[in-house]
Image: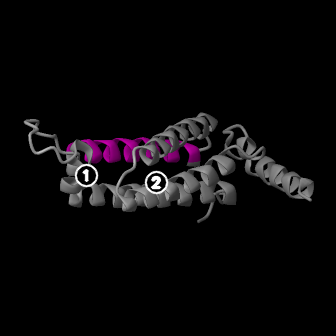
Amino acid sequence: MVGRTARPAEVTRVVVLSWVLLGLAAAATVLGIVLDDQMVRRSVGSDPDSTLSPPSFTPVVVVLDVTVTALVAVLLAFLRGGHNWARHGLTVTFGLTAVAAVGLLVASPLPVFSALAVAWVVLVVVLLVLLQRPGMAGLVAPAASADDREERREEGRAARP
């Protein structure tokens, strides 16, 4: 493309890993819909005398997935546009979802959700490290020209052992 500067590799990595994370969330949503009956039985228990009619998890799972996916997609668009505040927004969003995933593990979910939660936390930790690397702020700052970003990238490479 003529006239466009290439996006820094660090930003591209964050974007790709974020979409992988959102794909994992979509898989968890589909599994939540498919395994809804098992989750409800597990959460209520097996008390035959219970008159409670347990609610379905499906609406909650779908709304949560759509909301988080939309938020992350918007923040990624701003990150690609060079807005540093989007990097902080993604950090907070991913951090809160990691806390929720750890909370899910504490609640003893179905084994498939435990595996998804562990994978989620690992991916979030990688993303948080990438988002908070010292050179990342300079790469997404809108005032930084392409030459400035390249210079900062080279300084970052030179500083590595």
- Tell me the tag on residue 39: 1
Task: Identify residue type, mark 1.
Answer: Met
Is residue 8 visible in the rendered structure shown here?
no
The segment highlighted magenta reads 59-79
User: Residue 16 at x, y = what percent?
Assistant: 54, 60
Q: In this orientation, which residue lies closer to the viewer: 155 or 25?
A: 25
Q: In what element is the residue under mark 2?
A: helix
Taking 139 as reference, is 111 left or right? left
Quarter of the figure that contains the C terminus? bottom right
Q: Would residue 40 be counted in the magenta stretch?
A: no
Residue at left offset 39%, top offset 47%: 69
User: Residue 90 at x, y = what percent?
Assistant: 55, 41
Residue ID for mark 2 = 117
User: Residue 148 at x, y = what percent?
Assistant: 80, 47
23 up-or-down from 64: above or below? below
Taking 63 as reference, is 132 left or right? right
